[in-house]
């Protein structure tokens, strides 16, 4: 339904993204997208590159007079750093290339990076041909696409936020009830964490890692509220929403795992301690006039949304560019060597949370379009309203007490 593709190298002229499958009539402004790009650029522990870039999109197609047309939306994001890399990244062949390698050739491949495997697979001599695309710079284009998915979801009352819950061995205190506006609260923190005490320790940890020439990973929690019951499907492996979310999120650079609800903890408990009991809740239409007493499933049952908040936890490994490099092999000589130490970040977990929100938004918008269809926003919302009205009618006669739509299930 919703398709997108990105192009661009980290130090090339620009990033490009094309998003296709959105209905016509969705209000959309470049500033909305730029606001998400700015959130992705934040985070204590980022490198100097983020001071060079101020990411902004330029619409090339698909939007007119502040509304989508239903046609493919193409966006361009220029790399400000390109001016410093034009000779290194020049698409044209030069006579000197045959005799003199370009500047910044990488042959001392970094353990954990795409450098070595990519270089062997694509039969290249310079790992720059691999790392320029493997760079997490590419996620800028994804976040631009996801900002449009987010705008669509907001039209039907679905909101996505995230916060950092772990960094480099330090846990944030568990959150009992999320703030009403999770992102407004998290974005106030330089690490996007809700625990100010843990934040101070995390910052010290990042400073220490920087001094040591080391890098740090961490975990973010993603929360989507306002979802209607029944996005995704149980009928086929590739339509199951949990599988689709896992694929999208594990495609984020350096992400090594995703948990849904209580995730791995569910494997250690009995069934009675895992499954969420159901009770009637008339008026709570989006969940089908019922409520789960708990939300250990994280809003997913049978590969479909339950209508309870969708809760994902996403783990990122430490970045593989270390300023105190690990041992490797120099592909130019075959001899043992220290890996290259390119400019990079000490940690980018805070940014990863924003990217994971984005990938979640893209998967959810796709599933919404699949469920409700529609070539225009009006058609989509009419279809959703019709579906929800039918759901609301099913358990209407239930005798028990109602509960509001926005009630939180811990
Ligand atoms: C990255 C290395 C750094 C990061 C970059 C990801 O870039 P540079 O090599 O220019 O210093 O800043 O992230 C971004 C540019 C970004 O927009 O997030 C890498 O090797 O993955």
Image (cartoon, helix red, strand yellow):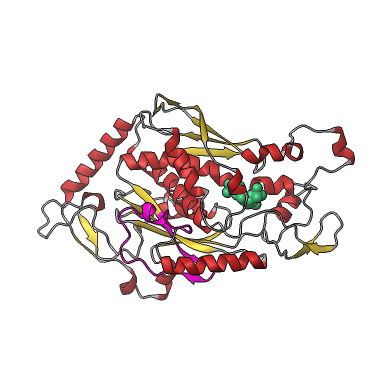
Q: Is residue 199 above or below residue 1?
A: below
* Farthest residue, direction right: 99
Residue at position x 65%, y 54% in the image: 344
- Please count the marks in the image: 0
The image quadrant that residue 403 belongs to is bottom left
Quadrant housing the C terminus = bottom left
**Magenta residue check for 305:** no
Front position in the image: 73 or 368: 73
Q: From where the camera sits, is residue 322 visible? A: yes
Left or right: where 230 falls relative to 241: left
Q: Residue at x 25, y 65 (%)?
A: 293
Q: Residue at x 80, y 44 (%)?
A: 103
> Residue 388, located in which quarter of the rendered image?
top left
Answer whether residue 189 is magenta in the image: yes
Compared to residue 237, the image places residue 14 above or below, namely: above
Residue 369 image point, x, y percent = 37, 39
Q: Position of residue 228 (x, y in %)?
A: 29, 48
Q: Is residue 298 left or right of residue 129?
A: left
Q: Give the percent coordinates (x, y) of residue 371.
A: 34, 41
| Quarter-of-image position of residue 374 | top left
For the N terminus, the image quarter is: top left
Q: Is residue 39 above or below residue 346?
A: above
- What's the magenta region? 162-191
Closer to the camera in the image, 207 or 222: 207
Considering every residue shown, the one lying at the far top of the view is: 65
Q: Is residue 136 visible?
A: no
């Amino acid at each position: 339904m919703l398709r997108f593709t990105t192009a661009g190298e980290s130090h090339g002229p620009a990033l490009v993204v094309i998003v296709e499958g959105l209905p016509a009539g969705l209000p959309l402004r470049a500033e909305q997208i730029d606001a998400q790009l700015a959130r992705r650029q934040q985070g204590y522990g980022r490198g100097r590159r983020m001071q060079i870039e101020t990411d902004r999109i330029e619409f090339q197609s698909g939007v007119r007079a502040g509304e989508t047309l239903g046609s493919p939306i193409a966006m361009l994001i220029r790399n400000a750093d390109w001016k410093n890399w034009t000779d290194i990244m020049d698409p044209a062949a030069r006579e000197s290339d045959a005799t003199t390698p370009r500047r910044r050739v990488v042959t001392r491949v970094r353990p954990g990076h795409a450098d070595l495997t990519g270089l062997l697979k694509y039969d290249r001599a310079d790992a720059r041909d691999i790392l320029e695309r493997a760079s997490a710079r590419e996620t800028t284009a994804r976040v631009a696409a996801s900002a449009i998915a987010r705008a669509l979801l907001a039209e039907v009352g679905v909101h996505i936020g995230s916060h950092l819950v772990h960094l480099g061995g330090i846990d944030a205190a568990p959150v009992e009830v999320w703030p009403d506006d999770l992102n407004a609260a998290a974005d106030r923190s330089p690490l996007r964490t809700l625990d100010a005490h843990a934040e101070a320790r995390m910052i010290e940890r990042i400073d220490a890692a920087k001094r040591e020439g080391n890098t740090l990973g961490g975990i973010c929690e993603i929360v989507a509220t306002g979802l209607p019951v029944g996005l995704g499907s149980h009928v086929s492996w590739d339509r199951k929403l949990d599988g689709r979310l896992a694929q999208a999120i594990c495609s984020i650079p350096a992400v090594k795992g995703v948990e849904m609800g209580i995730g791995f903890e569910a494997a250690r408990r009995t069934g009675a301690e895992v499954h969420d009991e159901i009770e009637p809740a008339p008026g709570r239409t989006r969940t089908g006039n019922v409520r789960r007493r708990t939300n250990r499933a994280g809003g997913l049952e049978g590969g479909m949304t339950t209508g309870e908040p969708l809760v994902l936890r996403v783990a990122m490994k430490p970045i593989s560019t270390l300023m105190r490099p690990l041992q490797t092999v120099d592909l130019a000589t075959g001899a043992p060597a220290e890996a290259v130490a390119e400019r990079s970040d000490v940690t980018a977990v805070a940014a990863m949370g924003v990217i994971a929100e984005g990938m979640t938004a893209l998967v959810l918008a796709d599933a919404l379009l699949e469920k409700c269809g529609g070539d225009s926003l009006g058609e989509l919302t009419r279809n959703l309203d019709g579906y929800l009205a039918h759901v609301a009618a099913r358990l209407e006669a239930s005798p028990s007490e109602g509960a509001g739509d926005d009630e939180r299930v811990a």
